[in-house]
Image: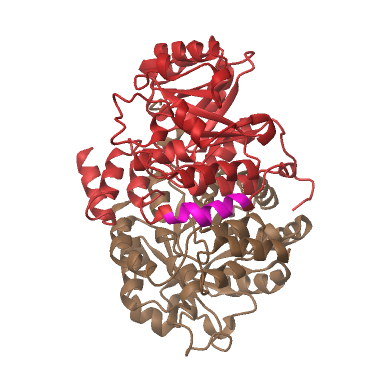
Chain colours: A red, B brown
Amino acid sequence: MAETAPWITYRPELKVLDCTIRDGGLINKHQFTDLVVRAVYEACIEAGIDYMEVGYKNSVKSFPKADFGAWRHCDEADLNRMFPGHDADKTGLKLCAMADAGKSDYRTQIVPRSESVLDMIRVAFYAHQVSEAVEMINYCDKLGYETCANLMAVSNVEDVEIDTVLSAIRETPAQVMVIVDSFGYLYREQIDRLYKKYSKALEGTNKDIGIHAHNNQQLAFANTVEAIILGSNRVDATMFGLGRGAGNCHMELLLGFLRNPKFKLRPVIKLIQEHILPLKQKIDWGPSIPYNISGQMNLHPREAMEFREGADPDNYLAFYDAIVQDI
Amino acid sequence: MAETAPWITYRPELKVLDCTIRDGGLINKHQFTDLVVRAVYEACIEAGIDYMEVGYKNSVKSFPKADFGAWRHCDEADLNRMFPGHDADKTGLKLCAMADAGKSDYRTQIVPRSESVLDMIRVAFYAHQVSEAVEMINYCDKLGYETCANLMAVSNVEDVEIDTVLSAIRETPAQVMVIVDSFGYLYREQIDRLYKKYSKALEGTNKDIGIHAHNNQQLAFANTVEAIILGSNRVDATMFGLGRGAGNCHMELLLGFLRNPKFKLRPVIKLIQEHILPLKQKIDWGPSIPYNISGQMNLHPREAMEFREGADPDNYLAFYDAIVQDI
């Protein structure tokens, strides 16, 4: 291969976001030990990662504290306990949290940026919730935060609805709009089509387009690379792919691919070795056949997750037969 | 998503080749039970797969029968025992074997097609062995076989050498030339570049271009899809990805993606359930971190395989440190 191949260079503006604790918490109700959360934080800093999404700002009414760990709510007290005196300038790492439309009491849960260790709020929403999402983005922007719009499960949204959402988000101060493949359904021609659609709709706004891929069909890393090729400068990944269902784009694959020398692979592998592999003994994630099938069929991973938590999680044929019969 | 998206259609000429036993045999010295080989054969027929590569026609001198199973040599007696009276027309499945340049006594091991259940010989070779490969292709063609040229480890071959190989293969009767990513190094822009190079060099010959991907970076399926998008009509995959090192493109992902109704997914999942998952208890394959790293570094999977067979196979950090130090 020629030494001058384009992949040897890099775009310095490409930013990596780790959402291990946020997305991974969807499979263990955010019951992570402080040790693990802190270890992910330190690995992010050492690895040169740009953002760490530490959890959700979700309502305690919907997600009672008796059942869910601290990172489902990201109370400021917990943030200050876990990341005391966090300094984004010194560490190179910005912290962020996700707030779901319909599931967060954002007017009381989110304090001004100047009073928080958080620098960004990512607003996650389904297409029908776009008006609330716009309100949330405007609200968080006024509090001083960077903001990001995550239209979830885009593979299940009609083209015309995507267009409407993009028009609405275009008018907000959100710096980023993310292509979110919640069901792990998309392959590269669909990523291309969505990227071009997002790009055209947001033209001239200076907004970045992000990518958040799930690994149902072993395509999370490939789809992330595809978005990068197209110009995406905001990229989500998780340590060892830890995340809901089939998991996410693996951080160790992503950093091994990126050519910016600021990114370091060893701290990520060390973290996986010491803290993530032990979790793998307790909770299930990754592209096993039930997730392959739900991804291929453009289904929410709910049924596959229930199956993998059930009595006979490796009976792939039973899952296939049940799902095919169901459709 | 629009119902008229191009992926809803299919190319009837696209042919799928299963190389589970051939490639998988590289991790267990082809010590498969007859039960497993027969089960793969029956699953291929039921699933509508076009070719099954049953093993190597490799020399017994280099691969003694005391150490290696029958499918390292594919003696006609073994073929007739395992696939008695095999009929490609009736089953829709053609059988083939691979012969390596430098490792096969092809003039004595390969009998005329009319005397064998095999329909195709795939000739595998490194760039420096291209002259022997051409001889082998011509020889097998004269015996009546379909032939296929597999230049291995192409990510490690200089551009000018690839050009020379393509010029030599162009003049042979081989119906197919395969892009072989032995090290699992390539990502989609490189697949594109190689596909265009192969395509241009073979223009006007009516040869098909094939794809044989390894899964070191979880890109085997994505790279296979990419080749299909570009026009590849010969596609390799294995059941549950069973194959050397990180394994191959998973058949269950591929068939779930293809839109030709002749392909059936259920027999593949049934086979995996009954025969491949039990193998997973005994032999290791799949994109674990040592294979991620060797893929990223464009290395032969040898070191990663040794590591995974060693005393501390999950000590990924130790592998990383050893390899980085070594470079």
Picture quarter containing residue B128?
Answer: bottom right
Residue A8 appears left or right of A195: right
At horizontal 63% and vertical 66% (from top left) the residue drawn is B300
Picture quarter containing residue B35?
Answer: bottom left
Could you tell me what secondary structure mostly forms the magenta stretch?
helix
- Is A280 drawn above or below residue B10 in the view shown? below
What is the count of numbered marks? 0
- Is B201 drawn above or below residue A71 in the view shown? below
Q: Is residue B263 visible?
A: no
- Is A291 drawn above or below residue B68 in the view shown? above
Q: Quadrant of the C terminus of chain B?
A: bottom right
**x%, y% of residue A263?**
67, 43
The answer to whether residue B8 is magenta is no
Q: Is residue B205 visible?
A: yes
Which is nearer the eye, B232 or B63? Answer: B63
Which is nearer the eye, B309 or A203? Answer: B309
Magenta range is A267-278
Residue B27 appears left or right of B107: left
**x%, y% of residue B185?**
62, 55
The answer to whether residue A275 is magenta is yes
Which is nearer the eye, B83 or A5? Answer: A5
At horizontal 52% and vertical 37% (from top left) the residue drawn is A188
**x%, y% of residue A242?**
45, 45
Q: Quadrant of the N terminus of chain B?
A: top left
- Is B300 drawn above or below residue B200 in the view shown? below
Residue A30 appears left or right of B60: left
**x%, y% of residue B62?**
58, 86
